[in-house]
Image (cartoon, rainbow, N blue to C red):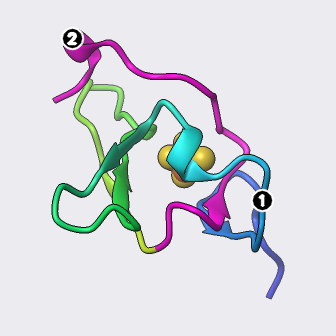
Amino acid sequence: MEVVDSQLHLAQGTTKPCLKCKWQIADPTNPDQGQCTVNRTAMGSIWKRWIRDVHNMTCSKHEEGKLSFREHV
Ligand code: SF4
């Protein structure tokens, strides 16, 4: 199956891991896992995606940095 680049996918050793992405929220109990908050509906609600491996997963919406506290839910 073809990997759709805009979607969260496994990329072993990627230079743009979810770990360094501003849309990622770390899982407080397991730092290797997290949630992606990049997807927002027109109504403004956030559709979170589970990230199994924040070190080796990425997507084309990757943006380095940290979200401000206000932007988080
Ligand atoms: S926007 Fe992409 S790279 Fe960033 S946390 Fe979400 S899935 Fe990972």
34 sits left or right of 23 in the view: left
69 sits left or right of 6 in the view: left
Is 64 in the magenta? yes
Quarter location, residue 50: bottom left
Residue sitting nearer the eye, 45 or 62: 62
Q: Residue at x 26, y 24 (%)?
A: 44
Instruction: Report crowding for label 2: few under 14, some 14 to 19, many 20 or more residues within 10 A (C-alpha).
Output: few
Q: Which residue is drawn at 21% across and 11% down?
A: 70
Which image quadrant: the C terminus? top left
Which image quadrant: the N terminus? bottom right
Q: Give the range drawn in magenta.
A: 53-73
Task: Specify the amino acid type for callout 1.
Answer: Thr
Task: Specify the amino acid type for callout 2.
Answer: Arg
x then y, percent, for residue 39: 43, 40
Q: Name the residue under label 1.
A: 14
Q: How far apart are marks 1 and 2 (CA)?
A: 29 Å
Quarter location, residue 58: bottom right
Q: In the displayed structure, would residue 30 be above or below residue 68? A: below
- Residue reaching furthest to the bottom: 1
Circle 1 or circle 2, nearest the eye: 1
Q: In the displayed structure, would residue 22 be above or below residue 25? A: above
Q: Mark 2 points at which residue?
A: 70
x then y, percent, for residue 28: 18, 55
Query: What secondary structure is marked by label 2?
Result: helix
- Residue reaching furthest to the right: 2
Disc with the residue nearer the chain's start (1 vs 2) = 1
x then y, percent, for residue 67: 39, 20
Q: Is the magenta stretch mostly helix, strand or loop?
A: loop
Query: What secondary structure is marked by label 1?
Result: loop
Residue sitting nearer the eye, 29 or 11: 29
Identify the mark at residue 35; answer none if there is no mark: none
Q: Which residue is drawn at 45% across and 37% down?
A: 38
